[in-house]
Image (cartoon, coloured by chain):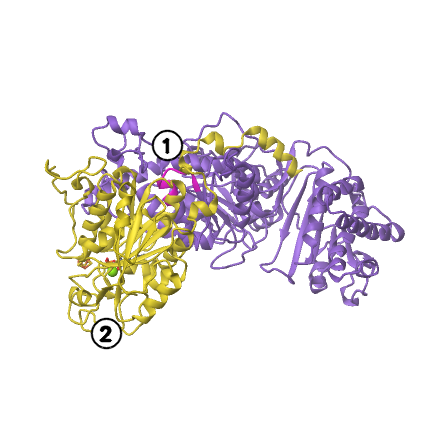
Chain colours: A yellow, B purple
Amino acid sequence: MPSIVKPLVAHPSLAKNALGLTIRDYEGQMSTLCAGCGHDSITAAIVKALWELSTPPHRLAKLSGIGCSSKTPTYFVNGAHGFNSAHGRMPAIATGANAANRELTYVGVSGDGDSLSIGIGHLCHAIRRNLNMLYVIENNGVYGLTKGQFSASTDVGSKSKKGEANKMSPIDPIQLALSIGATFVARSFSGDKAQLVPILKAAIAHRGFALVDVISPCVTFNDHEGSTKSYKYTRGATHAATESDFVPPASEIVANIGPAGSTSIRMHDGSVLQFTRVPDNYDVTDRGAAMKYLREHPGQIATGVLFADEGIPDMHEMAGSPAGALVNVPFEKLCPGSSALESLMANFR
Amino acid sequence: MRSRINDFAIKLANVNGTGSASANSLIMQAIFRMGVPVSGKNLFPSNIQGLPTWYEIRVNPKGYTARALDYDLMVAMNAQTYARDIKEVRTGSYVLYDSSWPLDADLHRDDVTFIGVPLARLCNENFKEVRERILMKNIATAGALIELLNIDADVVAHLLEEKYGKKKGLRESNVKALKLGGDYIRENYAFPLPFHLETMHANDDKILIDGNTATALGCIYGGATVAAWYPITPATSVMDNFKAFADKYRKDPETGASNYMFLQAEDELAAIGMVIGASWNGARAFTSTAGPGVSLMNELLGLAYYAEIPAVVIDVQRVGPSTGMPTRTQQGDILECAYASHGDTKHILLFPSSPAECFEMAPQCFDLSEQFQTPVFLLSDLDIGMNDWVTPKLKWDDSYVPNRGKVLTAEQLEKMNKFFRYLPEEGTAVPARTLPGVHSKGAFFTRGSGHNKFGGYTEVPDEYQEVMDRLLAKHKEAAGYVPPAIIERRAGAKVGMITIGGCEPAVREALDILDEMGRPMDFMRIRAFPFTAEVEAFLEEHDYCYVVEQNRDGHLCSLLTLETPVAKDKIRPVLVYSGFPLSAKNVLDILAVNVEELNAIYR
Ligand SMILES: Cc1ncc(C[n+]2csc(CCOP(=O)(O)OP(=O)(O)O)c2C)c(N)n1
Ligand code: SF4
Ligand SMILES: [Mg+2]
């Protein structure tokens, strides 16, 4: 099956971002996913977010594991390097990539199988390292690519296509991430672009690990009656815990005219994330409160930015790395040279 | 007994976790400083405290450094192992033991001289704290050995000064303990023993270093910036040392920033993933591990091989399978590394034989890995990695320029019509690569799934096969760049003896002995896979070759039969795999089994 190449016709009428690029410049290959797959909607939201942020395509690194979801980095930003790695291992590969070059923007795309089963260890440790990246879980509650097995995010009682009900308790990536110190945690729904795009933008602006769990129905294996990740079910059960708006640095002033009772968070890059607290008492900067809220609303799929903390050092800050990319440190600075070696030899006598 | 100068072996039996290690290295270092060729082998258990541990020291004027297996003095300090330790020494040798308690009558041997020193009693009388009494017993033992072996007391005093210069209390305790042991010998026994030390000058340009330290230093000098690992014996000290050297040499003088990233991964799957991610981005990255780690890394090693991403893996081999014997040495990962991962894969392996070669080969690993855009393994082992070896001083050539392989710059990409990742130029199997962040024109999708030469996804049979065939050609091409085998011929040789890695000293010693017996043999030490041209020629030239290696299944033998045209019956495996470093005696014992065949050939 050769990859399908999408015809790229530039529309003169298309709006341009700060780099003078149109949204078409952020598109990728034609998707080969099933028509109606939630993952494709997420791709579209990622395209929009990156275009709006004016991320230079070649300064973006797109990484993924294996699964239908993990195929999607091919479908956005052709001008960026991509790495479709191995099942569950993307966080490790992203860690190394980021270690070598902290200057790029990292977007990782994964599935619930990729992230919550085979790769759960890597995900947890990338969170602990506060690796600076956007990490999207395209969560359909099923293994799409291997044809419909339950995943670790399948809810108890949720039924497979064959009608079998899952009995094991699910892993909620949001609660998991919060419990191990994640610095940015959000959830959204693939069908709600209006909410998803600003969340993605804020997540990219976040300095540190930004986990975005996106409920993304699998139309082929998990969109039937009895599934808790179907379009029908999800539309009814999602419930915005916070409404967010993302204000890039250039238009910062706008942030000040948010609705009364809103919270603003200044992101590390100077942009501002502004929340309208839907439930009166929801404080997005309070980890304990976020965990409590999620525990107390088990049936609901709380969406929005559920927690954000801009004050925690990322992997490079913890390591004391140079401000620029390690790959740009010249060899002369890395190799101590012959005279240093000669004097070192005295220690081995 | 005829006096033997600088030619003997001693074995020290201890309980681990009691501080014997520092006394052992004090003696070893003192002998080294006396300019006498020496080797020390630590035969230790996989345990932190309480199990038997041995240390062997061999001095030899000709510089033979392999294990002797023939001890002139047993320093029996572990009552648990008295029986087997005393049994192990040969007739005419000596046993030094702690006479604070009488030795069991059935341990007595008439053909051995027992030297009792009441070490525990002396230490109990002279030191207050329990911990100090235990630690100083080892030092008092060293004091006795100084007299018995004629170790230069000034050298020892110097060493203590260097080690404890600032910690006056500790130094005084050490000096006191040394004196306790030494005085007792002087007052009660004839000393030195018939075999003992005399100052020489064999070590003027040498150092005492273990392979893991040398490897770490090689990675620093080779310009590695990302180190990712998961702790495992016997590879841990590679990373401990890398971190220490990086802290010393890699702090930016202006900003204080660390020009390296040290990642303790969650497991080996992640460690190799991090290496691959960093290399994908253009860094020199490596991991250090042992067999169990390589097993876990298999999946991603295939990805790096197929997607053509550099990765350097330092495998300090230990005894397998499974957890095996973590503190014992073996060369049992050769085949696993050569073909690591599912599907058709073949990797580049380098086989250092000493710490000096670990230092030399580490930068070569990075060069080859970047030049050929593929994983490269440095296959060290516990014997090389964790024992101190007398080695020529490490030298660095400041004219070294890292070979970063074919990496396209933004300017080159700008001028290109279109970049295709897996399309090499005429005359080579290695295509150019691009790094993320450089230019949109260089962007492509790295994938472990089927791809064609343009870098696009494919399931088309011919397209898939074309890439796989080129990967094979690339591996063959590497044979022209890896370190060649070391070959040494002897007049009258009829058969060859081939070996690998840390077997070298034992094999050389065995060859000298065979030569004296009228059985000269040619020597070849293989230093890399893919095999270089002279390896095939050597096999071709000899009626048959012994292949000495430390594993049960003859990994090198298999690799030679699989990857060269040599007939299987021209290879005679000499396999020693019980976990201790090789001795010439092991080799000769195996050859003795087929003595008729040898006699026939050399008639
Ligand atoms: C080591 C390994 N084991 C198993 C597989 C098979 N496999 C491919 S995708 C997948 C599950 C994907 O599920 P998920 O991550 O939820 O992605 P989705 O397809 O649902 O988007 C599995 C088990 C594999 N590729 N690699
Ligand atoms: S199987 Fe499901 S997840 Fe995969 S592409 Fe089809 S709809 Fe999407
Ligand atoms: Mg899934």
Q: Position of residue B328 (x, y in %)?
A: 56, 54
Element marked by disc 1: loop
Q: Which residue is at 38% across, 40% downward?
A: A101
Mark nearer the viewer, 1 or 2: 2
Q: Nearer the viewer, residue B484 or B439?
A: B439
Mark number, residue B405: 1
Q: Is residue A119 left or right of residue B162?
A: left
Question: In this picture, is B539 found above or below A280?
Answer: above
Q: Which residues are magenta?
A: B276-285
Residue B193 in sight in this render: no
Mark number, residue A111: none
- Reading the image, the residue beneath label 2 is A165
Question: In this picture, is A306 found above or below A79?
Answer: below
Res. B427 image quadrant? top left
Q: Amino acid at mark 2?
A: Ala
Magenta highlight on residue B282: yes
Q: Chain of mark 1?
A: B
Query: Does mark 2's beta carbon lie closer than 8 Å to ligand 3?
Result: no
